[in-house]
Amino acid sequence: MMARALRVTTPAPTDIVLTRVFNAPRHLVFDTLTRPELLRRWFGARGWRLVECEVDLQIGGSWRFVSVGPGGLKMAQGGVYREVQAPERLAYTESYDDQWVPGESVVTAVLTEHAGLTTLKTTLRYSSQEVRDLVLATPMERGVGESYDRLDEVFASR
């Protein structure tokens, strides 16, 4: 069985759920979500690159990413870790500089492994349905899909 494409659902008025299967063990997928040297290899849509990546992987620890995209466009985001249960669960806040997405969201990633494949289910919870709908209207789905395709390439190169 091979990895599948990104699945995007909206099970609640404030939530977006992103689900993707990777052909890699759970511990490795978790590492690629939390280790700066691995994040720099895949994070972001095609044409974007992570130029700053800080991760203090502990409850109350902060994270910050700065990406540069086409034409020098910059996107910066960060937050604070609320749960760190390696390799099965990660929860953190997320907010963007320059109001790419207004306010703060809570992100919960759950990783399950079966037969060498890992399912990553990420729930993005926004402050309102209006904010969630603003995010859905952006190229977020394409960007996350391309980012996860780049992650597949990292796994294939190991």
Image (cartoon, rainbow, N blue to C red):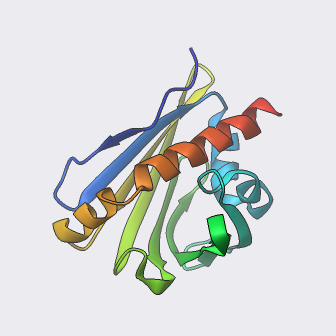
Look at the picture and state if 144 lies above or below 82.
Answer: above
Number of callouts:
0
Q: Quadrant of the N terminus?
A: top right
User: Is 49 situated left or right of 134 in this image?
Assistant: right
**Residue 62, horizontal then vertical, whole percent:** 59, 79
Can residue 57 be spotted in the picture? no
Q: Residue at x 29, y 68 (%)?
A: 126
Report the front residue among 93 and 101: 101
**Residue 21, horizontal then vertical, whole percent:** 52, 31
In this view, the residue farthest toward the right is 158
Can residue 143 be spotted in the picture? yes
Give the quarter of the image for residue 73.
bottom right
User: Is 41 situated left or right of 143 in this image?
Assistant: right
In this view, the residue farthest toward the bottom is 98
**Residue 6, horizontal then vertical, whole percent:** 45, 37
Give the quarter of the image for residue 33.
bottom right
Q: Residue at x 26, y 57 (%)?
A: 15
Look at the picture and state if 145 lies above or below 59.
Answer: above
Q: Quadrant of the C terminus?
A: top right
**Residue 141, horizontal then vertical, whole percent:** 42, 49
Report the front residue among 91 and 66: 66
